[in-house]
Amino acid sequence: MNTDIKYWILKGHKLFSTLSNSQIKELCVIKRFQKAKKGEIVYFKDDGVQRVYILEKGMIKIVSLDKEGNEIVKDIVHQGDLFGEIHLDKSEGEEMEYAQALSSEVRICTFRLEDLEMLLEKNPELALSYTKFVGLKLKKLHNRYTNLFLKDVRSRLTHFLKEWASNEGKVESGKYELNNYLTQEDLAKIICSSRQTVTETMNKLQAEGLLDYNRKTIMIKDLNALK
């Protein structure tokens, strides 16, 4: 990716809105861009290189593995979100974690942790913006885990669909259309349910006229009515 494209991608991200043109150009030098296709692994947490990532396009899932090797979906990352070593913590944890592309195309930009730390030290306003981004990310994760414990399957599923539609849905005449990147198994892991229960719940929502779905698309007819 040439420097001009990198410049305009970074300039358009609200995290870097406080930086001058020259600072963004400097940023282009230390920032790396990469692409991935659906199913490809974006990073492993224990690969020896600590990085912070920003998802520039697409959707990915953050997955951890328990001691038996079972997948636990910790988070779904949408366009503009941060992931990776966002706490700026150099300690090495025991947890195995990786990020995998869910959409047909994913584009991310990444900093080495040490480069990002130096950048934040030189730019107090950027450091403040970064702190706010991380705070918002942690709040979203807290809300997600609260939903998992306190809400039933239907509520967890509709909450996720509404969040997904708000982030990526194409709106026309009040309807939200989503490119359906996720399998029923993916949805089940995201909301901590079974594939069969998710399928049954999706079918009920469709029978009630709240949405239409197939393997390629999900059409939410009225976002506010989706409960």
Image: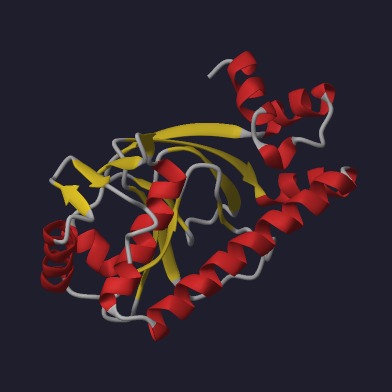
Is residue 62 at all visible to an observer of this figure?
yes
The quadrant in which the C terminus is found is bottom left
Query: How is the structure coloured here?
Result: secondary structure
Answer whether residue 99 is visible to the viewer in this image: no
> Which of the 4 quarters of the picture holds residue 163?
bottom left
- Residue 76's place in the image compared with 115, above or below, is below
For the point 60% across and 68% down, which residue is it? 139
Residue 220 locus on image (x, y percent): 28, 48
Q: Which of the two residues, 81 or 1, is positioned nearer the viewer here?
A: 81
Nearer-the-camera pick, 16 or 96: 16
Horizontal and vertical percent position of residue 169 = 38, 41
Residue 160 percent across, percent down from the top left: 37, 61
Position of 122 compared to 80: left or right?
Answer: right
Residue 122 falls in which quadrant of the image? top right
Look at 23% across and 46% down and name the residue there. 218
- Seen at 55% across and 49% down, the residue is 81
Q: Nearer the viewer, residue 191 or 54?
A: 191
Residue 168 percent coordinates (x, y): 41, 42
Q: Residue at x 60, y 59 (%)?
A: 85
